[in-house]
Image (cartoon, grey):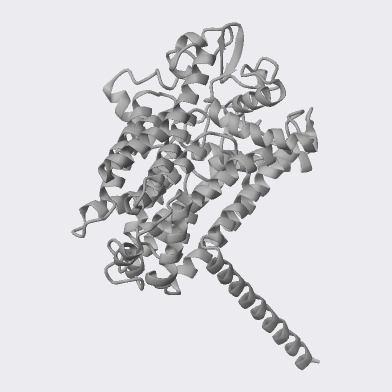
Amino acid sequence: MEKSDRGRRADSGAVWLIRVSFARTSLERLEARFPGAIVSLAVLLVLTVATQIIYGGWNDGSRLAQVQAIVEFHELNIDKSDFLNRTGDKYFYRGHFYSDKPPILSLYISLFYFLIRFVGLDFSGYGVPTYYILTFLSVGLLATAGAYAFRSILLVFGCPPRFSDLITFCMFSGTLVLPFSTLINNHVPSAMLIMFGTYSLCVSRRAENASAAFCCGLAYSLAASIDVACLVFLPFIFIASALQSVKKGIVFSVATVGPLAAHFYLNYIMTGGIKPASMTPSLWTYEGSTFSADNLSGVAGQESLAGGLAYAFHMLVGHRGLISHSPVLILGVAGWLFWFCAPKKFEYRREVACILAGVLSFIIVYILKSNNYSGWSFGVRWFATICPVLMLGYGALSGVLRRGALIRRSFVGLALLSIVFSGVGAAAPFPSRAPWQHEEPTNGLVSSGNAVVGSARRIAEILFIRHSDPEPLYRLVLPSLTLARFTATLAINLCLFFFFYRRWITAADPSPVSDQVDEVGSSAKFAGVSTFNRSAINQQYGGGPLLSRGWAD
């Protein structure tokens, strides 16, 4: 009998090994046929679990009001919307209330809302499951496409494919990108559009025509039309395009006209001027308004140098800091410095210098023209837009991370810590959505963590303490889903990180002269490039920037 049990266990183990081997083979076949498919599917898997099921408060409530007004009432004002009294992010102009959100993104989201209404879904009640489906289709799919563009940029920079997969997943799951990919907002869409534009800009350097420059201008201007602060990128990207050739600079400029003209025209209709509503205090003087020139982002600022320095510190590395909420960015920033200080010249130095100048300007604008740390959000949500650009610095470290055990361990530690932090943020991107949160949060990470812990406490109170509640079902379901999504998201992210890490560290990447050049060449079609200089890429990818020892690094 004992022998029979051992035999069955051996058979089960053999079957399990066969299944694992088959799964790995299937994944590699999928990756060979569709480069980037594995990491794209990983992003979709995480978003399937992490996406919010109910709107989070004023920010997305205001945008939902605009979407509902466009689709259901064919108007730009939100007077008839169900969300009118559920948001304070609204202003009053000529007898009507309007959302303060730039309308271009709302028009994009309206396309999906228009389609899902055909199956009987709308915003009645709390909008479940409409909000989940709408968020996944509008923001989630765009985040996935942006992650693919991010990976393509790393390939153009000369990184091995499996290393690119690993860093792409870290960019998504270990920064502010994940928390704000789970709900409707403009930060992640603008970040992904910047990735499309950056990829097109880099491809344009090798392209024989100006179609990539047109795609670059279109992407960056769309980013600026849905996140006004991204306007600071446009002059720098124009300079980068013009340095490639005068023709490409002109084509870039022409491509920006359409989105910017639409943005300013709609803005004029809704505000009577071209300035955003958030920069026009007179629109916020109605009874019950919580905003004024003292706290409007775009108008308000710091009253003293000491206050400004303290605000900048906490925006970047302090209690609401970009780095403190996404520690994995430390090595990304170090990678950019490494690229510019290394003796071997980085081929795309001019392009990334212009992009980084835009990032620096973006940060300075928010430090100088705001004073509220982006409100009730996890971290400074505005900076989700620039996280992918900062993570591109890892392209300089692929060889260093493989050869150096200490820096590799540091990377793993920072990545795991960031994944945990982002998992907390994905559970509660706006901690105030939790009904047990009353005090104004000063630390986005702690506040979001309190929301997760509060979920567990709330479940225990209702299940085991017979707590009377006017809405027991709502108060039980929401905390339960918050806790379940946090647990599942964290588990999936950690498993996928180790999958991508082991896949990179245990196997050599394919030769750049064959498989990888084909992958980059096919990716060039993404930016509309009809011809691609294969010999130039072969020469570049012989070691890649800062990878003189070849692909084994």
**Which residue is at a point 33% across and 54% down the rendered structure image?**
206
Q: Whole-percent x and y of residue 137?
A: 64, 42
Seen in the picture, residue 126 relative to 397 is either above or below; the reply is above
Q: Residue most toward the left?
A: 343
**How far across and down, in percent of the image, does residue 14 sit?**
67, 84
| Residue sitting nearer the eye, 37 or 212 | 212
Look at the picture and state if 369 lies above or below 343: above
Q: Is residue 62 left or right of residue 360?
A: right
The vertical placement of 178 against 534, above or below, is above
Q: Quadrant of the C terminus?
A: bottom left
Determine whether 484 is above or below 109 in the image: below
Left or right relative to 399: residue 427? right
Q: Position of residue 514 (x, y in %)?
A: 41, 72
From where the camera sits, is residue 169 visible? yes
Q: Residue at x 61, y 77 (%)?
A: 21
Q: Is residue 163 left or right of residue 352?
A: right
Q: Is residue 314 visible?
A: no
* Quarter of the figure with residue 62: top right
